[in-house]
Image (tube, rainbow, N blue to C red):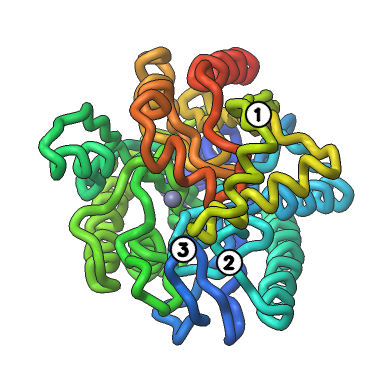
Amino acid sequence: MIIRHLLLIFWATIGTCFSQSSFQVGIAKINITPKSPAFLTGYANRDKPAEGVVHDLWAKAIVVTNKKEKVIIVTTDLLGLSHQVSTEVAQKIQEKLGIERRQLMFNSSHTHSGPMIWPSLSVIANYSYEEQKIVSEYTQVLIDKLVEVISHAYAQQVPMQVAIGKTSANFAINRRALAARKNGILLADPIDHEVPVLTCKNASGEIKAVLFGYACHNTTVTGNNYLINGDYAGFAQIDIEKQIPNATAFFILGCAGDQNPEPRGTVELAQQHGNTLAKQVIHLAFSGEMKSISNDIQSDFTTINLRFKKVRAADYQKDLQSTDKFIQRRAKLMLEAYNKGWNTDHYNYPVQGIRLGREFRIIALGGEVVVDYSLRTKEDFPNKNIFVAGYSNEVMCYIPSERVLKEGGYEAESSMIYYGMPGPFETGIEEKIMKAIHQIVKNIN
Ligand SMILES: [Zn+2]
């Protein structure tokens, strides 16, 4: 009898501890693999539809709430969401669930073996009417599915404990440094191998969600591949879900703008990198080194004005005569915008901050952010545990640091053509973004 009483007290105490420190967490996933025929995006050389599927692509949503606040993170096995897609989903979710823009974060894994999202990276595509229809329809279906998966996660909330930890991976290299070494010149080669891990456990101690991030392009599989897959991040998530059977794995891409996986070139190598990453994450998740976070949530969202270098209409007129079809298409796009009086001098760039507990912060930046932003943020805030995610909310183009902008090359200049952007950004971009990051960290403190 006494033992029974003691047991009851023991369970009651555990129950109280659990509910005091626990959040309400809802988790859902939805299959976003496109129907055939599908057009892949990420490499400009592709000239035919996808030829098969290695594994399915997913959109996943996790809702974390406490009595005062809530935050929703949505991850997708896609190259990146366009401004139109994330804005429309956010508006629908605000109407449906009352979620504010600051409370909703999107991130894309940037797999280069996923479907084209319109109108992102439209300059690399030259579709027929029928093909364009397929791409536009997929984009509409995606919007509906994102609303569905968020709503589903929102409706599924149960008490869970959230814990965080940190491990690392080692297959990212700074591709600008690698290219430079090949040409015999050595540039700086910044890299960020940190892998943050966040787990959610239900009342029975079962892991239901694993969030993890890494700063490395999902370009293990190259442009000669026509099979749909999520690259290393897709394989890593599948691996984690296989080994922790009732868990959903969420990959968040870091500042991978200038980071490539090495070696690369085949689906097998993508699987190999995925397995390496999954192994690290799983090991940490069960190591006893994960630390529960306090019951506190905060978020903020802002847009800042990033200016492009001035280009005259006459220069685009000249570009119309270029033998490069991508330069021609960009010029056509810009002249149309000029003629209609649309803005071509700046971009409204999204910067978001999320704080989970007192112990973990995510700075979510739009676009293909180079690694300098992650390293500098960590340097500026040595006492705050911050993961800087790129590819968040929308992927409009590369976001170079001042160093990369000065060096020039793909991420600073030529990639802007493929993204249909007016031209390179003006100097001062890094200070503007860092200033916004500092303000957001202060606001969510
Ligand atoms: Zn990229």
Disc 2 C-beta below 8 A from ligand 1: no
Residue type beneath disc 1 = Ser
Disc 3 target residue? 44
Residue 15 location, quadrant: top right
Q: Which residue is drawn at 37% across and 68% down?
A: 223
Cβ–Cβ under 8 Å for marks 3 and 2: no
Q: Which amino acid does label 2 sit on?
A: Ala
Give the structural element (helix, strand or loop) at label 3.
loop
Amino acid at dot 3: Ala
Q: Which residue is drawn at 30% across and 49% down?
A: 260
CA separation in Å, label 2 and label 1: 36 Å
Residue 141 point in image, percent of width and height: 73, 71
Discs 1/3, front = 3
Nearest the viewer among 364 and 159 is 364
Q: Name the residue under label 2.
A: 125
281, 41: nearer the viewer: 41
Q: Indicate left or right for 83 with 79 as reference.
A: right
Would you place residue 426 above or below residue 99 in this image?
above
Query: Is label 3's Cβ within 8 Å of ligand 1?
Result: no
Q: Is residue 343 left or right of residue 182?
A: right
Going by the picture, which residue comes out furthest to the left?
A: 184
State the mark number for residue 299.
1
Q: Which of 165 and 13 is in front in this view?
A: 165
Please provide percent x and percent y for residue 266.
Answer: 26, 71
Lower position in the chain sequence, tag 3 or tag 2: 3
Badge 2 density bin: few <14, some 14–19, many ≥20, Cα 10 Å = many
Whether tag 1 and tag 3 are in contact, CB under 8 A, the answer is: no
Rendered-image quadrant of the C terminus: top right
